[in-house]
Image (tube, helix red, strand yellow):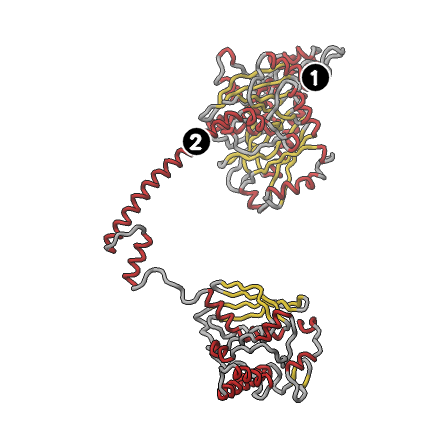
Amino acid sequence: MPRIVGIDLGSSTVKVVRLETRARGGHEVLGYYEAPVPPPSEGQEGASTATERTSAALAELKARGQLDGDVFITGLPGDAAAVRTLKFPFADMKKIADALPFALESEIPMDLDDIVLSWVVLGPSARARKERGHETEVLVAWAKKEAVQQILDLLAVHGIDPRHVHFDALALGDLHDTVLAPAEAAEGPTELRTPGGTVIEVGPDAAEPAVAVVDIGDKRTSVCVLATSSAGTRLVGAHTLLHGGADATRALARAIGLPLAEAERGKKKEAFIEVSGAKAQFPEQQHISDVLKSAYAPIVRRVRQIFQAAMSSARVRVVKVYVVGGGSRVLNLERHLSEELNVRVVRAGAVDHALRSTLPVESRVDAPEAAIALAYALSGVPSLRVRPRVDFRVAEFAWKGDFDFLRERAPSLIAWAAVLVLLLGGSSVAQALVASSNEGALLEKELKICEEITGQKVESFIRCKALIDEKINGAAAFAVPERGAADTYLEVARRLPPAAEIKRKITELDITSERVKLRGLTSSYDAIDTMVARLQGGRCFSLVEKGKAQSKGTDIDFQITITLDCAAAAGDGKEFAPPPAPTAESIKTSTTGAVTTDRPAITDKPAPDVSRSAQQYGTTPPAGDTGSPRAAEIADQSNARGKLTPEEIEERRERLRKLREEREARRSARTTPEGLNPVIGPRPPGASPRTLKRDAVPVDEGKEEE
């Protein structure tokens, strides 16, 4: 278990408390040690600065082996740090952290870049929550960066890297929660009268009771005020007074004419303060009592002001004071403070008990001056922590020992991780084997049941289910869909106008179960509308939408989307004739690149069998005028070969004439009802649509697209 070392860097002595945590909680004090800080030397051989003298005391403790430990905790004195209580109208931690520097600009007479901040949220009382609503009180502690760095450098010389750097006045709150409060609970309820006879008001409208821990050191006095309730304690404030026991020592030395060292020993052993029930017996005692009262008067006055401020600002009444520290060793000092403050004041004997309870008899000491060091050490016990603490090891001073701890133990951690992975892998393999055996047994059982139901031996559960569905529904569980992608493709191809009618080229055709996406190139926007009109009414074509169309060189890139829903679109049932079969001239033109006219020239090549094309498509084959030279040529050539009779020739001429009339009717249908073409105006008499199209002035593509 880790050993925790609390180090109190006092001005006259360095105090150290070592304790060890237990596996099941709790702790055990291993010892209390102290080393005097040498006085300032006038020569150049000894230590002259306070840092050098403190380092000498640490070196003495290090040499005696009294600084051995795993976790080190220390703190800053009150003259190197300060605290303030601020109020914010919100409780969000991130907002408080962002607003804190701006709120402190008017409170701190120094640049914020030169200080280090640490803050905790104070738990409000029930009255405060009722009166202030959602207002949040924050206790902010700050110190100069150079002061924190100086402490870290001082300890680093002796191989100590403290994990936490506290504020000594706030550490007294941890001392109360871990040591003083349990002893107070054993004493019973607090008296309802002060030593002066004042009745302490109780009830829902009364001020909240509070306790104060006062540590009287050599040059400083630290005061911590905590409100107490059934729910626990909450921090009210922490203060540092620049008065201490050294003031009383100097006053005695001047009054009696003794050296400071002898005056200090006399103060601790024979000094006396006159109080009610303990009168001075000799004039010398009376004189010493008067000197000490005068020396402690500044401390009494400042503590009284602190209690009054807590009553007015935080609505708490201090009903009990614990006195600790080396300056509290003066006889009758606690009784004198009780009379002056009208508050019950006691010596913190629980501190002595905490130090003596686990030590051998020969090591037991009465050491009220060990309170701060004991508080530091106890704050490192995880099971004893009850509230967030102020710690100056933040930002650039953050402790990085955790990474060093992991780095040192990385090999063992990796080994344990490998063992854990192997165990998990073995467990997974075992579970897979068990599951596989169970799966085989279940499959065999399923097939056996299927054989009993169907009367056939099957090899898979899917086949078994298909047989059962076939017997129940009269069909297998699977079936060919009514319409597939091929049916949709054929429907699109059947309804699209042929390439001979409009110029088009399909570049993309995507068919899914829900829609058809068609994309291609054409020559005009009217052609797009024609294709959309032809596609509407197709089988399963519930919605035909024209998409984006844009000019792409001499062509127009178009998109058409068809929504498929066979239940909603049964189709209009229209039948469209397939495109005419290619003629010899069209084939020749496509291979030679020649341009055809309305009446192609007669060639010596034999014409194709027109009747065969008509029989192939099931419609009347194309035919020209019965008296045209081309028709006569076809008849003469056929008759010359002895294949057609004159009656057959006449019949085919009639069919060709009807086909040409139908073709001319389809071309006329694309004009306006009045025979007016929307692009080139009225059609002249005798002019064919193809001639008009050739002679027409092309419309601006940008305007046509708009």
Q: Is residue 287 left or right of residue 665?
A: right
Q: Quadrant of the C terminus?
A: bottom right
Q: Is residue 199 visible in this depiction of the protein?
A: no
Name the spot of residue 541 as percent of width and height, x first: 49, 71
Cβ atoms under marks 2 and 1 closer than 8 Å: no
Q: Amino acid at mark 2?
A: Leu
Above or below: residue 241 compared with residue 699: above
**447 and 43: which is toward the camera:** 447
Residue at image point 23% right, 55% down: 455
Above or below: residue 194 compared with residue 293: below
Above or below: residue 348 compared with residue 662: above
Q: Earlier in the sequence, mark 2 or mark 1?
A: 1
Name the spot of residue 58 as percent of width and height, x first: 63, 16
Which residue corresponds to mark 2? 422
Which residue corresponds to mark 1? 52
**650 and 636: which is toward the camera:** 636
Q: Is residue 615 visible in this depiction of the protein?
A: yes
